[in-house]
Image (cartoon, grey):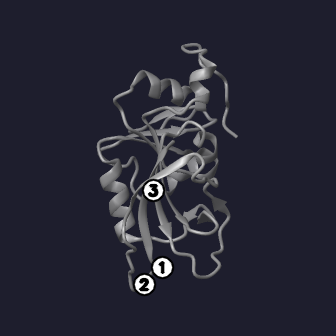
Amino acid sequence: MLNMNISNESKNKDARLAPVKNIYMIVAMTEKTNAIGINGDMLFYLKDDLKYFKETTLNHTIVCGRKTYFSFPRRPLPNRKNIILTRGDGSYEGAYSLHSKEELVDYAINNPNEDIFICGGDNVYKQFMDVASKLYVTIIDEDQAVEADSFFPKFGDDEWQLVFESAYIDPETAPRYKFTVYDRK
């Protein structure tokens, strides 16, 4: 778990409990079990999903944990502000580091015109689920059991409203999948 010390700049706990309008999540997960990865890697490399991720996050801010950051083949991801959530004091060339959920929420509140995309891993998703205002979810059809050790948090239509759903993309060499977007109600 990340260090959760509250920054000195903001002590407004109510703001931290409410969704933040410019914090989003972007994830590719299986439909039935919300599986996202195994052994520190993605379950599937879906060409159109990687393109969608790039197009959606380009010229915006991405936030991930240290392990997810080091799983990127190219670091930092170009044409995006890269923020790494970490417990450590290390620095990352071309990227910024924050040490708590509160620091990122403060940053988002103080930069309301900056779109911030949480992009993994599973512990980071769990920490920010309560403050995200939008979910960009690639849903991978799960016609058979998938081995996984990391999962996206469960979510439902009691809190989230589907606002976009593409047709299924059916590649020959991978499971079919579709793009969805959910807004917090």
Alpha carbon distance from label 3 to label 1: 22 Å
Please tell me in which quadrant of the rendered image residue 45 appears: bottom left
* Label 2 residue SS: loop
Q: Quadrant of the N terminus?
A: top right
Q: Amino acid at mark 3?
A: Phe
Q: Disc 2 designates what residue?
A: 173
Q: In the drawing, what numbered circle is on residue 123?
A: none
Q: Amino acid at mark 2?
A: Thr
Which residue reaches farthest right? 1
Residue 71 screen position, x and y as percent: 51, 57
Q: Amino acid at mark 1?
A: Pro
Q: Tell which of 82 and 142 is nearer to you.
A: 142
Q: Is residue 12 above or below residue 94?
A: above
Q: Earlier in the sequence, mark 3 or mark 2?
A: 3
Q: Which residue sits at x=35%, y=48%? A: 57
Q: In the drawing, what numbered circle is on residue 175?
A: 1
Q: Earlier in the sequence, mark 3 or mark 1?
A: 3
Q: Tell which of 41 and 133 is nearer to you.
A: 133
Alpha carbon distance from label 3 to label 2: 22 Å
Alpha carbon distance from label 2 to label 1: 7 Å
* Label 3 residue SS: loop
Q: Disc 3 designates what residue?
A: 72
Q: Is residue 100 above or below residue 37?
A: above
Q: Is residue 178 above or below residue 66?
A: below
